[in-house]
Amino acid sequence: MTPSAAAPLLTVVTYHFVHPAERSVVPGLKHLELGAFVDQLAHIRRHYTPIGAAELIRALDEGATLPPQPVLLTFDDGYRCHYQDALPALAAASIPAVFFPVASSALERRVLDVNKIQCVIAATPDISDLVQAIESELDSATIAELRGRWWKRSRWDPEPVVYVKRLLQHALPEQIRLPLVDGLFAALVSSDERSFADELYMSVDELREVGGRGVTVGAHGDRHLRLPTLDTEAQAREIDGALRILDAVGASRRRFVYSYANGEHDDRSIALLRARDCAAAFTTGPDIATLNESERFTLPRFDTNDLPAR
């Protein structure tokens, strides 16, 4: 790319659960209905030109020209519904994609904390019961502090849901948080984590197969940890662990793509990825991506809810 050339722009969209309601691993779990996804793909076909990861990397590395209104579709966490439901719809629409599985889920069949929390919330009819269960472990001063910081709405969730998510995701001390998450999941969702993981996540064989069906497999963490919360050595372990999935599915570690867990990263994360020959990394900030050197490791993505479903 010449210095005077304008950097190309790219719309990137991220997906999580995409399936019919009857295929949900827990009734009530938030997801995009398959029919709405198919309609959204038709909308994308009308208004955008889908590209794959290889075209993105050529644009970043070589200044290659992108087609008009380019869009890249990404799918985080490696769910089986991406293989069962999203992939056939993508193939029918001739749209490439990038799948970002988490290494420990695909390889060791561990259920991610973020998924345990989502399933616990879906399995609880009254969110106030979860608030009470969590706060029963805390003193009144700690409760007041946590409510002051985390009792707030997000783009998608009301105050008590955000509060429960943030406390169980990271705000509580580990010695309180981890037993709470595991206990709630075992009591409300499943006491057989391995079988639940087999139902929830793609297998390595399925991930190998998608690589031959218009999908690029990228990396999304070893245990889906928030990188800025870790010291540099732990960040390196989380990223290196994530790259195990590339080895397992026969994908190259050269010029790979990476999706930050929860979109979170810092300067150390970028330096570690750059040193490992990463080509591009994605956040969760909703915006149009500018494909230049200074932003290749902080590419924003829209959520599927930002696009029309029908």
Image: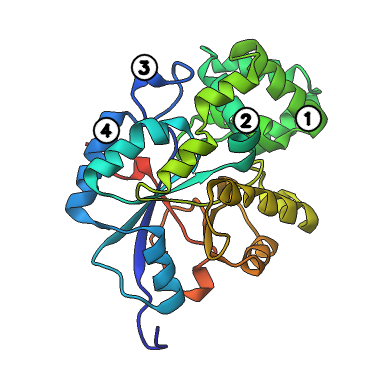
Q: Amino acid at mark 4?
A: Ala
How far apart are labels 3 and 2 at the CA level?
A: 23 Å
Q: In the rendered view, does 176 fall on the left or right side of 273? A: right
Q: In the rendered view, does 55 fall on the left or right side of 263? A: left
How far apart are labels 2 and 1 at the CA level?
A: 34 Å
Compare residues 305 and 83 and report the one nearer the observer: 83
Q: Residue furthest left?
A: 46
How far apart are labels 1 and 4 at the CA level?
A: 42 Å
Q: Amino acid at mark 2?
A: Arg
Q: Which residue in the structure is indicated by mark 4? A: 36
Contact flag, marks 2 and 4 (Cβ < 8 Å):
no
Other residues around mark 4 within 10 Å, as few (<14) / some (14–19) / many (≥20): some
Other residues around mark 2 within 10 Å, as few (<14) / some (14–19) / many (≥20): many
How far apart are labels 3 and 4 at the CA level?
A: 15 Å
Residue 122 in the image, given as x and y percentages of width and height: 51, 19
Q: Nearer the viewer, mark 2 or mark 1?
A: 2
